Amino acid sequence: AGGSNGVVLSAGPVFSSRDTEQSYLAKIAAAQHEIREGNSYEVCLTTTLTARLPAAAAAPWPTYLALRRKNPAPFASYLRFGALTVASTSPERFLRITSDGGMRAEPIKGTRRRGADPERDSRLRDELATSLKDRAENIMIVDLLRNDLSHFAEPGSVTVSRLCEIESYATVHQMVSTIDARLLPGSPRAEAVAACFPAGSMTGAPKISTMAILDRLEGGPRGLYSGAVGYFSLNGAADLAVAIRTLVTTAESGDGTDDEPAAVLTLGVGGAITADSVPAEEYDEVRVKAFGVLSAVGAEFPTA
């Protein structure tokens, strides 16, 4: 249903997934095999949900406003590049560089859904806060980002100012850490950003070898998802978010016959796989992460 309650697509788009539940579980098993073989410590495995609908039914700006209402987040953004529109409600900072050279990364690793009542919600938050598995995942990425930042940081300036703290959002609790550093004087800021890209929380560790594993497993490019969205300022400051909880709309033209113009909606979702991961729980986490965006547009997680 549409209109004033914030659902902006008349009947809600019907999404399909690149992976069935069984194929995703098989990919989790393959990722864990790579970990047991010593090729990775943590693999951030993802999949893609897509929906195709008439262009007239897609309303990117109202969709973004609905996302803001349903899934408010500190790094929300709306971008339009011709046929491509990005509506993002990302909770995760990739990298901030201040005009005087302060650097900060705030990776997220560890997720629980919000509870239906305050008591259950508090239990889920406490469960995340005390989870040794989630802490281990988070700390692995903290170590990776400490290394990434060190390439352009003043010696001795890289510090962890916040470790494995819990932040709560409309649909999820998240485990977040903060790494700070000072940019080495004279260092090009764009190169400092490039040294940290892509976000370690979206690859796993070690970064390069794990990206090769992901290239084999995922079955297609991620597109904008898991990249970075933000700005560079004329005074040297920059602030970029990780492109998660992000809906990308791409306009397609008809083929010149009776086909009407169409729009394709794309949503990337995933999670970190470690040796201790329980595959069914990891698949459920994918559903949890997708919920905020899907519910904002009146859609459901695909069942096939």
Image (cartoon, rainbow, N blue to C red):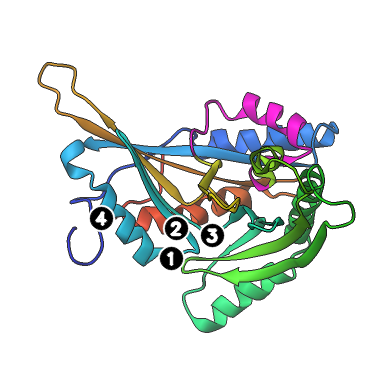
Q: Label for residue 72? A: 1
Q: How many numbered tags mark residues here?
A: 4
Quick one: label 2 or label 4, which is nearer the N terminus?
4
Q: Position of residue 114 (x, y in %)?
A: 52, 70
Q: Position of residue 54 (x, y in %)?
A: 19, 36
Can residue 169 be seen by looking at this rendering? yes
Q: Secondary structure at mark 2?
A: strand
Tell me if residue 263 comes above or below residue 295 in the rendering. above
Q: Are marks 1 and 2 in contact (CB under 8 Å)?
A: yes
SS label for mark 3 = loop
What is the three-letter code of the residue carrying label 2? Ala
Q: Amino acid at mark 4?
A: Pro
Give the vertical position of 79 relative to 210 (above or below).
below
Q: Which residue is mark 2?
A: 76
- In the rendered structure, the answer to whether residue 294 lies left or right of residue 224 reads left
Q: CA distance from mark 2 to mark 3?
A: 8 Å
Q: Disc 1 and disc 3: Cα gap in Å?
A: 8 Å
Mark 3 and mark 4: Cα distance apart in space: 20 Å
Q: Which mark is residue 91?
A: 3
Residue at x 81% of width, y 42% of height: 151
* Residue sitting farthest toward the top: 256
